[in-house]
Image (tube, helix red, strand yellow):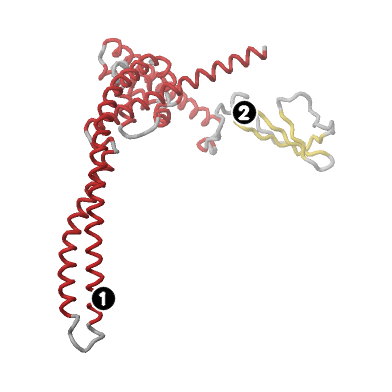
């Protein structure tokens, strides 16, 4: 009988024994007793023991496939040492960043937290610290909003980039800052919206009359042009049905009239299209500088509202969970 024995530090034993009935019995060396699950007597011969290294990793790592237990343990120690080194470096970068934030050196703090993010991109402390530095400790919250409002990205992109925990912490710690900025935007929006909408309404009345007049002139120019054009074609075709030239002169005269009407029709068509274009443009806020400014304020306001509403939803969920737990108790 051949048996391979390995220290328990590296593995545990699985013992395979053939029974008298020809079956193979599997026995864990760490289990109590030597009988199989059915209490069946096992033979002493043809005993084989397999050793499986025990690892702390939950997932299978191909690097361990062809290594001996000693080599696997050494590799694991190297990995743990590297993880510990990165963790220490990350902690040091965060501490230095916090110190720089406290001293008001926001640009230097930003670089430190950026270094920490490279070491651990999912770390909450580094993500929050990075944006605290970029926004001068959130005295300039629009710096954060700029990254997403100008790119027309929703609040979900912020959560994807920073992580849900980091965004939640920012919302919780600086909620008052965001609420204050939202109120400022509402204050800026109200008088500007009144100004823009008042001018828009005044232009709407004028452009409506202009469009109505241009439409009447467009139709008035189109009718004689189409009439003269149709008559020119009709008399022109009659020239092929008679042996004399009685329809030649009427065709030429009508053709000249149609040409003149066509020039007039083009002029009034251009006026009609311009009136329609200006009427549509008046309904777009982005067509004026004040309107474009109002749109930008509303985009920022909507972004901050999404940010704060998201936090309110979380708080409501937490209150609901607490009430449920109290009810169960």
Q: CA distance from mark 2 to mark 1?
A: 104 Å
Q: Nearer the viewer, residue 223 or 139?
A: 223
| Secondary structure of residue under mark 1 | helix
Near mark 2 (Cα within 10 A), the count class, few <14, some 14-19 or many ≥20, is: some
x, y percentage for residue 230? 26, 70
* Displayed quadrant of residue 57: top right
Quarter of the picture holding the C terminus: top right
Determine the image quadrant of residue 191. top left
Q: Is residue 45 left or right of residue 126?
A: right
Left or right: 28, with 301 as reference point: right
Which mark's residue is nearer the viewer, 2 or 1? Answer: 1
Q: Residue at x 18, y 76 (%)?
A: 250
Report which quarter residue 31 is drawn in: top right
Mark 1 — residue? 234
Q: With 218 as the anchor, is 298 left or right in this view?
A: right
> At 75% from the left edge and 39% from the top edge, which residue is drawn?
46
Q: Is residue 12 above or below residue 267?
A: above
Taking 328 as reference, is 116 above or below it?
A: below
Viewer-closest of 90 and 30: 90
Q: Nearer the viewer, residue 129 or 139?
A: 139
Q: Which mark is residue 51?
A: none
Relative image position of residue 232 (x, y in whole percent): 22, 73
Q: Earlier in the sequence, mark 2 or mark 1?
A: 2
At which x and y percent is residue 19? 81, 38
- Within-10-Å neighbours for mark 1: few <14, some 14–19, many 20+: few
Dot label at residue 11: 2
Q: Which of 259/166 is in front?
A: 259
> Are the residues tagged 2 and 1 within 8 Å (C-beta)?
no
């Amino acid at each position: 009988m051949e048996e391979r024995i390995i220290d328990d530090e590296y593995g545990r034993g699985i013992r395979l024994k053939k029974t008298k009935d020809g079956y193979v019995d599997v026995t864990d060396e760490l289990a109590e007793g030597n009988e199989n699950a059915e209490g069946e007597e096992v033979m002493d011969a043809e005993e084989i023991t397999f050793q499986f290294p025990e690892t702390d990793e939950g997932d299978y790592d191909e690097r361990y496939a062809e290594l001996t237990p000693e080599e696997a343990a050494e590799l694991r120690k190297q990995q743990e040492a590297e993880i510990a080194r990165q963790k220490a470096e990350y902690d040091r970068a965060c501490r230095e960043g916090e110190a720089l934030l406290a001293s008001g050196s926001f640009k230097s703090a930003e670089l430190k937290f950026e270094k920490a993010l490279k070491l651990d991109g999912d770390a909450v402390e580094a993500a929050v610290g990075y944006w605290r530095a970029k926004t001068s400790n959130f005295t300039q919250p629009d710096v954060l909003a700029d990254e997403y409002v100008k790119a027309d990205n929703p609040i979900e992109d912020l959560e994807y980039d920073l992580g849900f925990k980091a965004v939640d912490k920012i919302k919780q710690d600086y909620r008052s800052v965001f609420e204050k900025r939202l109120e400022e935007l509402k204050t800026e929006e109200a008088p500007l919206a009144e100004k823009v909408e008042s001018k828009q309404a005044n232009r709407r009345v004028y452009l409506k009359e202009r469009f109505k007049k241009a439409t009447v002139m467009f139709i008035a120019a189109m009718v004689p042009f189409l009439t003269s054009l149709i008559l020119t074609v009709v008399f022109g075709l009659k020239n092929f049905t008679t042996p004399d030239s009685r329809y030649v002169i009427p065709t030429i005269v009508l053709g000249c009239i149609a040409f003149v009407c066509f020039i007039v029709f083009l002029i009034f068509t251009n006026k009609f299209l311009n009136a329609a274009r200006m009427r549509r443009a008046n309904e777009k806020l982005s067509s004026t500088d004040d309107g474009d400014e109002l749109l930008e304020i509303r985009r920022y306001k909507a972004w901050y509202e999404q940010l704060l509403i998201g936090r309110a939803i979380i708080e409501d969920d937490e209150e609901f969970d607490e009430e449920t737990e109290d009810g169960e108790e």
